[in-house]
Structures are given as structure tokens and as C-alpha cells.
Amino acid sequence: MVGLFWIDAESVHLGTPSAMTASDVLLTPDSLRVVGPEPREWPWSDVTSVEVIGVPVRSTGGRWASRAASVAAVALDVWNPSGPDEMTVTVSAEGGRVETTVLSGAATAYSRREVDLSRALLARFVDGTSSPAVLSDWWSSADPGALRSRGREAVLEEWLAAQ
């Protein structure tokens, strides 16, 4: 997971892929695809905007406090895990506007900078100055492991710098 994107060997997702959700948003070099009960697909040239609403954002201190509280709850055996936060993806394209729900990939929340960089990258996909191929190429050449917030921000900045 880097920013709002979940990247694996087969695909790039906006949000976390899950068999539990009714829909999924996939990003390919050629198109944006909503998978689920009402599947849709648009070539990037038809997409006029992609917005992600309801993104969980916390300050660094807030994220650390949430993690500490989770660890303490587990240690005290009072942990009641909740599922990931839901985010709404709105796609505007020729033919109308579609909203779908995806799950957040952040364990507690994203940093404000990570969200801003992710949204800037989405805007680049829409205006044609970048492609989700940058993410796929990075995945196949990198051995990222679990990146911390600053590492994810650095990767997003790298993708934004690539033209």
C-alpha cells in the first residue's frame, strides 16, 4: 500500500481490494474500472475527475496514539477490532458520474501529505500526464516491504516527479 493505492503483482487498486466489499476500483494504464454489482469501465481519455471522499486522516501524533491504544487493548485482551474505514470514490466521465465504496488500506489513518500526494497523482492520471503503469513498474522492480508514512510519501513524490 502506497498512499490511497494498493499495488500487487496483478493490479493497482484505489483503496484495498477485498472480497468483503461489493465493489473495487482498478486502475490500468488504459482505463479505470469499477468491479462489482454494477461494473463500469472508462478509458482515461473519457474520465474528467476522480475524487476520494471520507479518507481517514490523522496527524502523526494521532496515528501514534491510535497505534499505542490498539497495542494496549490487545495486551489487556479488550481489543475489539473494527474493519477498515470506508471511502467513497466518485468517477466523473463521459456518460455521467458513478460513486462506489472502497476500503482504506491504512492501519489507522493516512497522513495529510500522503492523501494530498495521492490525489495529485490521481489528477495526473485523469489529465494524461502520468499513468498507473508507474505504480505497476515500481512494484515489479522494487522490494518495498512495509513502508512507513515518510517512505510512502517519498515514493508518491517520486511518481509525481516521473513524467
Image: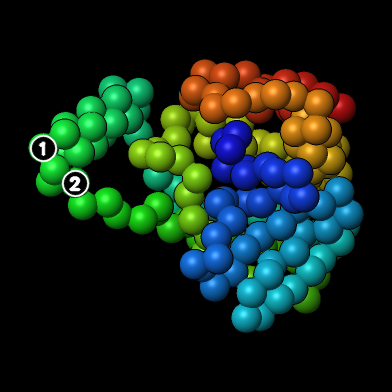
Quarter of the rendering occupied by the N terminus: top right
Q: Is residue 48 above or below residue 62?
A: below
Give x and y (percent) for residue 147. Answer: 55, 24
Give x and y (percent) for residue 59. Answer: 34, 27
- Which amino acid type is shown beneath numbered disc 2? Trp
Residue at image position (66%, 60%) is 25
Residue at image position (71%, 57%) is 26
**Residue lying farthest to the bottom in this orientation:** 37
Q: Is residue 157 left or right of residue 136?
A: left
Q: CA separation, marks 1 and 2?
A: 8 Å
Res 132 → quadrant: top right
Q: Secondary structure at mark 2?
A: loop
Q: Is residue 23 above or below residue 136?
A: below
Residue at image position (66%, 36%) is 120
Question: Which residue is under mark 1?
Answer: 76
Res 143 → quadrant: top right
Evaluate if marks 1 and 2 touch, with contact meaning CB atoms under 8 Å apart: yes
Give x and y (percent) for residue 4. Answer: 57, 42
Residue 134 in sight in this render: no
Density class for disc 1 (Cα within 10 Å; few <14, some 14-19, many ≥20) is: few
Res 134 → quadrant: top right
Residue 79 numbered tag: 2
Give x and y (percent) for residue 139. Answer: 75, 33
Q: Is residue 85 left or right of residue 9?
A: left
The mark tally for this picture is 2
Q: Is residue 94 above or below residue 30?
A: below
Density class for disc 2 (Cα within 10 Å; few <14, some 14-19, many ≥20) is: few
Q: Secondary structure at mark 1?
A: loop
Closer-to-camera residue (161/146) = 146
